[in-house]
Amino acid sequence: MKLVIAVVQDKDQRKVTEALLDRGYQFTNISTTGGLLREGNVTFLIGVQEDQVDGVIEVLSTHCKTREQLVNVFPPTIEPIGSCIPNPVKVQVGGATVFVLDVARFEKL
């Protein structure tokens, strides 16, 4: 058995949820926050058999899209906030970050 952990942008949650349910996958999702942009994400915990991992990753790659977003980057300085005006920078956001782990033991109680 495998545990697929997928961190997905909030904007893609509904599509991913519907697609996983349509294919019969069982999962738990947890609201999370990203460290860099401090924006909302959803972390999916999906337990599957080894031969189902590729199907889960296919759902994620189909429904999790990368986007460009403007972000204000503050320089690392000791000056008080407001003394400099940050320039917005384009960054890639979205997509999915996926981890696949071996499960040593699974019980449903």
Image (cartoon, grey):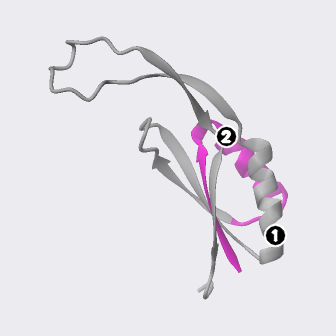
Left or right, 99 with respect to 78, comes to right
Which residue is located at x 15 percent, y 27 percent? Answer: 78
Label 1 residue SS? helix
Question: Badge 2, how many Cα within 10 Å: few under 14, some, many 20+?
Answer: some
- Magenta stretch in the rendered image: 1-26
Which residue is located at x 71 percent, y 42 percent? Answer: 64
Left or right, 76 with respect to 40, comes to left
Residue 22 shows which numbered tag?
Answer: none
Which residue is located at x 80 percent, y 44 percent? Answer: 62
- The image shows residue 77, relative to residue 105, as above or below, that is above
Which residue is located at x 56 percent, y 24 percent? Answer: 69
Q: Can you give x and y, in whole percent of width and height, for residue 72 in the image? A: 41, 21
Which quadrant: the C terminus?
Answer: bottom right
- Identity, as a three-letter code, of the amino acid under mark 1: Gln
- The image shows residue 29, relative to residue 77, as above or below, that is below
- The image shows residue 78, relative to residue 4, as above or below, that is above
- Identity, as a three-letter code, of the amino acid under mark 2: Asp
- The image shows residue 45, relative to residue 43, as above or below, that is below
Left or right, 38 with respect to 59, comes to left
Instruction: Tell me the residue that label 2 is attached to.
Output: 12
Residue 52 shows which numbered tag?
Answer: 1
